[in-house]
Amino acid sequence: MTAATTTLTRVPTARSGWRGFGTLLRTETRLFLRDGTAVFFALVFPTVLLVGVGLAIPGMREPITGAGAPWDGLTAIATYVPIVLAAAVATPALTTMPVTFATAREKGLLRRLSTTPMRPQGVVVAHLLINLGAIAVSAALALVVGQVVFGLAAPVSPLTVVLAFVLTVLSMLSLGMVVAAVAAKGSTASAIGNLVYFPMLFLSGMWTPGPIMPDVVRDIGQFSPLGAAAQAMSAGWFETEVPTLQLVVMAAWTAVLLPLAVRLFRWS
Amino acid sequence: MSTAPPPTGAATVASPARADASSVGTSPVVEVRNLRKTYPGPRGSDARKVAVEDVSLTVAPGEIFGILGPNGAGKTTTVECLAGLREADGGVIRVLGVDPQADPAAVRDAVGVQLQEAALHEKITVEEALRLFASFYEAPSDVEELLDLLDLAEHRRVAFGKLSGGQKQRLSIALALVGNPRVAVLDELTTGLDPAARRATWELVERVRDRGVTILLVTHFMEEAERLCDRLVIIDGGRVVAQGTPAELIDSVDTSRTVRLRVPPADHDLALHTLAGLADVEHVEVDGREIEVTGTRRVLLAVVLALAEQEVVPDDVRTVTRTLEDVFVAVTGRTYDHAADSAAPHEGGAR
């Protein structure tokens, strides 16, 4: 066989690995939307959390006094927004996504796809896109509803907030992919995911937002991906200083976790 | 998926001759020569577990070719190698003239695979699954036609998780055919099905073959292989121990024949005495009222004539037909392990 004909047969072969990706993405999205619990947590939970905390806990809508800069003058619920955004990223990344991949592997679906022209990587890409979409919708919903119900403070430096949010998404999806890579079964992925998810939420300040976070939690939290996420978004929202350490921490977690996930990922 | 280089000895790769109908009649669809595959042994040991020692087979266009053997014999590993899912340690594999180890992508469009125990998302419907898989192929089959062919049309909106075992299996076959393949590999198609669903599935396999698809059927059910296969290999311990058509294999076993009969209780002892003395009889065994007589090819004739001479009229005479099971016993010296049949529907893929 000559080099020319080899090229001819290779080119369509390479492209055929993604034929039907549009159908795959549409089908996987429909299946994602059919799981009511997952949809609630991925899309609505951050908004419910923000509104619930703001309305149920007394004093959350009062301006903060005596906490010092940058907190004084802000409502307590406003300082909760970066934490809710961090949760909006962490929830699908650590709970639904790893279970989806581990279940697909456990059921032999990834192996089954390996026998078709579609590459099993297609499922991974489809679900990354679905989760990105879910994160965008759930963060936007929380912001819009939060604005309507409470009237939130505008970010001091929107660019920092956006950069911090993007790094949050990257580091959390990488962490979720490591869980998806090591868990052999859906139930294992769920267990590991939750084991990582709740300490992450704690370090992000879910239960000790803004000024009431103890210094020791803040000091430890800034080195965890979700703690750094909440602190970086908070800094961008309420301060002028660029949260360099937190941004670097998130970039570093991504740089370590993403290659690790790719290395550890098993297709069967 | 392995991206390692192809095994040495693999010749140059040609693209599958999908359009080239002239070559179909002559050249084999699947050719396996001296396939060998080992897996890493237990952790910490250097010994590798041999799954396939030495398997060779040739599948001609349009036939239903069986790979029969007990669980753990190496059947699934063999088909996984030829589907490009696993990399062989040695030997040569050609599917439609292509080496799936070197160019798995070239084989995927032309080979439909039904994997043992591959499940789908619980909530995907029959029609969604078929349309999804159809979208992956260059020239897919008509989904409506497949729904009809596999009696799935009325279940098109049913979620995978709500299908019965037989319906799941039919969907799995449909998914293997949706790419309009030249070859379909069906692995342990009827494991876990009740006898009625099993017979219905066999009928479907024949319908599929009538459409011109060459079928490679992996099974541990002797009856299934005997009923469906045009030709087959029997694999045991990673080696081919017998091959041929079911009839050839059965005829090759031995020349003895067995007859079971019942006579009126009053004539029982007389019958036993008479039969034991016959030249064509090698062995007489009593099982309650039944007498089992084994002997030469002429044993049936000899038994009936001898009893007639003694005025003994049997209540019932049956010849015991030999099956592929007897072939297995003859070539391996072991009985075919029925316990493993029912106890192992959940075995893993690595065998």
Image (cartoon, coloured by chain):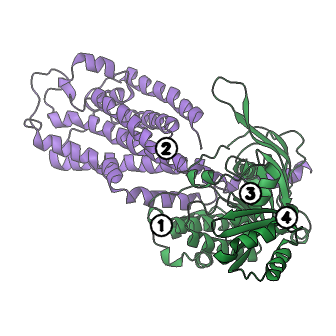
Chain colours: A purple, B green
Q: Is residue B118 left or right of residue B87?
A: left
Say what amino acid the circle numbered 1 marks: Leu
> Which one is in front in this view, the residue at disc 2 or the one at disc 4?
4
Mark closer to the chain start, 1 or 4: 1
Residue B310 visible in the picture: yes
Say what amino acid the circle numbered 3 marks: Leu
Q: Which residue is the site of mark 4?
A: B256
Q: Secondary structure at mark 4?
A: loop
Q: Which residue is the site of mark 1?
A: B163
Spatial CA distance of label 1 from label 4 is 47 Å
Residue B263 visible in the picture: no
Q: Are marks 2 and 4 on the same chain?
A: no
Q: Which residue is the site of mark 3?
A: B68
Which chain is home to disc 3? B
Spatial CA distance of label 2 from label 1 is 22 Å
Mark closer to the chain start, 3 or 1: 3
